[in-house]
Amino acid sequence: MADKTGTVRLHRVLRAPAARVYRAFTDKSALERWLPPYGFVGTIHEFDAKVGGGYRMSFTNFSNGGSHSFRVTFTELVPGERIRQTDQFDDHHLPGEMLVAIDLKTVSCGTSLNIVQEGIPSVIPEEMCYLGWQESLEQLARLVEPEIPN
């Protein structure tokens, strides 16, 4: 019997336009800033924001220097609305391909963001994925919500 994989579902409303939120998911510097959970530094080693392209990124633990890396391949990009991607860890102890669906919808106060991540390797507890995503989304909000004049 194959190991059971996990799924996490997240929803957040951001006080920012959908175009800005979308850009945060498809901009190298933005991803390096907001995606790593607390205590990690993110580095993108390769980046190509187009369908069939994607990026390779590592998260390095600032306290002990340990790191892990993963690859993202964009399978669908609809500016301001939708991103579909596959994620795969480089570590062979974390096998399989995760499917990630990111949906953006303009609402009265900004953008409704829905994320579904499926196929999380069974050795990773779902609650740890939720915790990491919650930290990342807090940092995303701090990046996209400020209205800074020119």
Image (cartoon, helix red, strand yellow):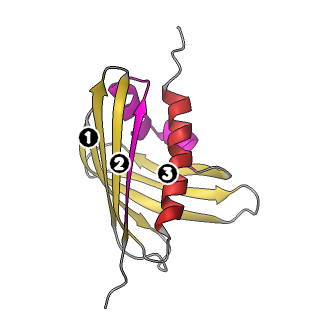
Name the residue rendered at 57%, 40% in the picture.
33
Q: CA distance from mark 1 to mark 2?
A: 10 Å
Q: Secondary structure at mark 1?
A: strand
- The answer to which quarter of the image holds residue 72 is bottom left
Label 2 Cα neighbours within 10 Å, binned few <14 / some 14-19 / many ≥20: some
The type of residue carrying mark 3 is Trp
Horizontal relation, residue 107 to residue 89: left or right: left
Q: Disc 2 on helix, strand or loop?
A: strand
Residue 133 - label: 3
Reply yes or no: does residue 142 show up in magenta: no
Please report whichever mark, 1 or 2, sits nearer to the chain's N-terminal start: 1
Rendered view: 117 above or below 34: below
In percent of the image, x 76 and y 63: which residue is there? Answer: 64
Q: Residues within 10 Å of mark 1 (few under 14, many from 20)?
A: some
The residue positioned 34% from the left and 33% from the top of the image is 112
Specify the amino acid type for callout 1. Answer: Arg
Q: Are marks 3 and 2 in contact (CB under 8 Å)?
A: yes
Question: Where residue 23 appears, x then y in whole percent?
Answer: 39, 32
Give residue 116's position: percent from left, percent from top. 33, 54
Q: Nearer the viewer, residue 92 or 121?
A: 121
Q: Nearer the viewer, mark 1 or mark 2?
A: 2
Q: In the rendered structure, which amino acid carries the disc numbered 2?
A: Ile
Q: Nearer the viewer, residue 23 or 17?
A: 17
Q: CA distance from mark 1 to mark 3?
A: 18 Å
The mark found on residue 138 in the picture is none
Which of the labelled discs sits on residue 82, or is there none? 1
The residue where tag 2 is placed is 115
What secondary structure is marked by label 3? helix
Residue bounds of the magenta highlight? 7-36
Q: Residue furthest top?
A: 150
Q: Is residue 29 visible?
A: no
Going by the image, does 128 lie left or right of 120? right
